[in-house]
Amino acid sequence: MKLISKPFDVVIIGAGPVGCVTAMSLANCGERVLLLEANPNGLRRLAGEWLHPPALKILQNLGMEQLISTLRANYVSGLGFVVFPDDGTEPIKLNYPNHNLGFSCEHNTLVKALRKAILTCPNIQYIPFAKVTHIEGKTVIFYNKVINKKQSVFSETIIGADGRSSIVRKHLGILYKYHLISYMGGLLLENVTLPWEGFGHVFLGGIGPALVYRIGCNQVRICLDVPVKYFRSSRNIAAFLWDAYSPVLPKTLLSSFRYALENRSIAWCANQFSPRVCYGSKNLTLVGDATGCYHPITATGMTLGFQDAERLATSKNFQAFQRDRLIRTYVPELLALTLYQVFTRLDYGTVAIRQAVYQMWRQYPDECYRTMRLLSGEETKILSFSGSFTKGLGIAVSQLIRDKISMNHGIENISTLAAFKEWIELPLRIALHRLSKNYH
């Protein structure tokens, strides 16, 4: 086994988007960084393709303005989202506030661009085809496929940016406990026009939400959320997806959607929930999905990971970094859980809340503004989330009680209120779950 004698302050395992941004953030602070990637060709999978405005700002602060300009030169994206309600009413447009812009592109394209950028940084050494086999103290042992040899490197700090199956997380003894929510099927549509170009489209009314957005000049991604019971029981999944989602998609997409189902492979990933409560330790630190993950309905995965990188580089110590991230990821976790349930559950209490959310977005522009600040990660204060949350609950409860009274069912008001008990308790349950964890 060959020991790398060159000194490094930091070894980062995983050169995906979060690993690359972490490397750039630390290198810009003067750290000498070794970045290891086991499978540099494993890019053609369904993974993050949407960056909220805070993520773009982080890239800009790292001097990557040219990279962003090049990626977004040929098409418009990242203006916000348009929600198409399940009741057939008019779509609801949610712009990013203050003319801020996000960005969407194929995951493969983004990773290649970021890896190209890190090669220009003198403080970063990138080794592809380097599979980490184990960690011993402050030494990382890996197999370098390029030279067909085992190598080791010593570093005071080892960072796991290696996703849900993180070897750093395993070495720390932190079990990856997750709840399987659903499966996501991704397809590529070509030569289609979206109803609202530049926006992400959320179509409701199918068996799960369908998210559609542009990732190239002639390419559009469609992501279909499939409940576990349907995914496991469907023999002809392509035919099933057509029957389940074609009724809620616009006619302009149907021909390309059918072609993709019949002629292209479907990329699948599991939508899991694992609270972001474990960030490792001073010498073995976790960032990105290695810390935990949420349902991608809010598309916050890469943005949260970039913010991990930025805070890690600017925090005075690990304790400050961990404290900051625990505080600032509570609301994104709440929002992802809440929004997915509001969009998918069919009990009458949730249906009432869903209608209340539509009403709130349509009647109160300040709620659209607040929603998008929360969604993008610009606003992480619990009071801001609570304001929208309680307002939506209030509208839903009031409407249901009025309906009951108008039908002379006043005696049922107590049971009606009981239907919202679970929703009222949700923020408290998540907070208690986080507090119960041993963060150290």
Image: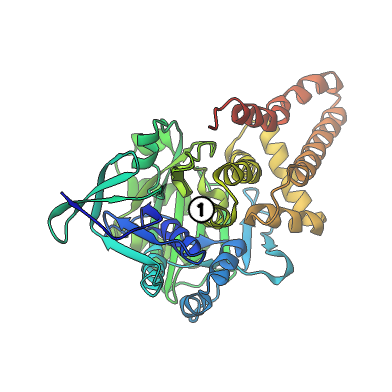
* Residue 278, image x, y percentages: 50, 37
Q: Is residue 324 left or right of residue 360?
A: left
Camera-nearest residue between 402 and 356: 356
Specify the quadrant of the image occupied by residue 114.
Answer: bottom left
**Residue located farthest toward the left when viewing the structure as drawn:** 148
Picture residue at 47% right of the left edge, 48% below the top:
287
* Residue 153, image x, y percentages: 28, 51
Camera-nearest residue between 306 and 23: 23
Specify the quadrant of the image occupied by residue 176.
Answer: top left
Q: How is the protein colored in the picture? A: rainbow
Hey, what amino acid is under mark 1?
Answer: Gly
Camera-nearest residue between 387 and 207: 387
Q: Residues within 10 Å of mark 1 (few under 14, many from 20)?
A: many
All told, the count of numbered labels is: 1
Location of mark 1 (residue): 305
Q: Is residue 377 left or right of residue 116?
A: right
Q: Is any atom of residue 332 visible in this view?
A: no
Q: Is any atom of residue 363 visible in this view?
A: yes
* Residue 264, image x, y percentages: 29, 60
Picture residue at 36% right of the left edge, 48% below the top:
268
Dot 1 falls on a residue whose secondary structure is helix
* Residue 295, image x, y percentages: 51, 44
